[in-house]
Amino acid sequence: MSLPTTHGIKFWAIAVISILLVGSATALKASKLFKFPKNENYVYLTKFSVGEGNNGQFNFRAGFSSPLEGDERMQSFTFFYSVITDDDWTKFLNAKSCSERLALSNIRSYVNFNGDGYWSQVKTHSFFNKHRTTVYYIVAIN
């Protein structure tokens, strides 16, 4: 089941990004409380860059900012997110449909969580950037 965004329910998403550079690690933690706008099928969360020839890793988890009420409290929700490189970011912004945006994504994934206000399990993504220094954008997909 997808998030009940038609009611404007707030939820908290957190992306933890670790960039490994030649044996040393740098970590950046980003979090964002947001609602999906009524006329958009995505929300920008954060961005990070990885240099040429370096490993990149980020952890993703999500949950509601406070517990839902009634039957929704124990209901399971799915939060979809996507990673787009700077090569495709402008095309992503200009795309008209969700499927067009997803086609431009380098990573498409999701986490599941309940409406009880607790975090989802952490999902880790690791990759090697063999090309030029690249900026990676993380967005929530509705």
Image (cartoon, rainbow, N blue to C red):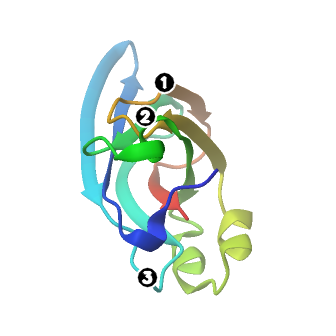
- Circles 2 and 1, Cβ within 8 Å, touching? The answer is yes
Amino acid at pointer 3: Lys
Cα distance, mark 3 to mark 1? Answer: 28 Å
Q: Which residue is the site of mark 3?
A: 38
Q: Is residue 49 visible?
A: no
**In percent of the image, x 65 and y 49: which residue is there?**
108
Q: Which residue is the site of mark 1?
A: 121
Amino acid at pointer 2: Arg
Q: Nearer the viewer, residue 29 or 7?
A: 7
Residue 11 percent coordinates (x, y): 33, 51
Q: On the rendered image, what quadrant is the C terminus found in?
A: bottom right
Q: Which mark is residue 61?
A: 2
Residue 120 percent coordinates (x, y): 45, 30
Q: Nearer the viewer, residue 113 or 116?
A: 116
Q: Is residue 6 above or below residue 18?
A: below
User: Tag 1: Cα neighbours inside 10 Å, few (<14), some, or many (≥20)?
Assistant: some
| Res 23 quadrant in image | top left
User: Tag 3: Cα neighbours inside 10 Å, few (<14), some, or many (≥20)?
Assistant: few
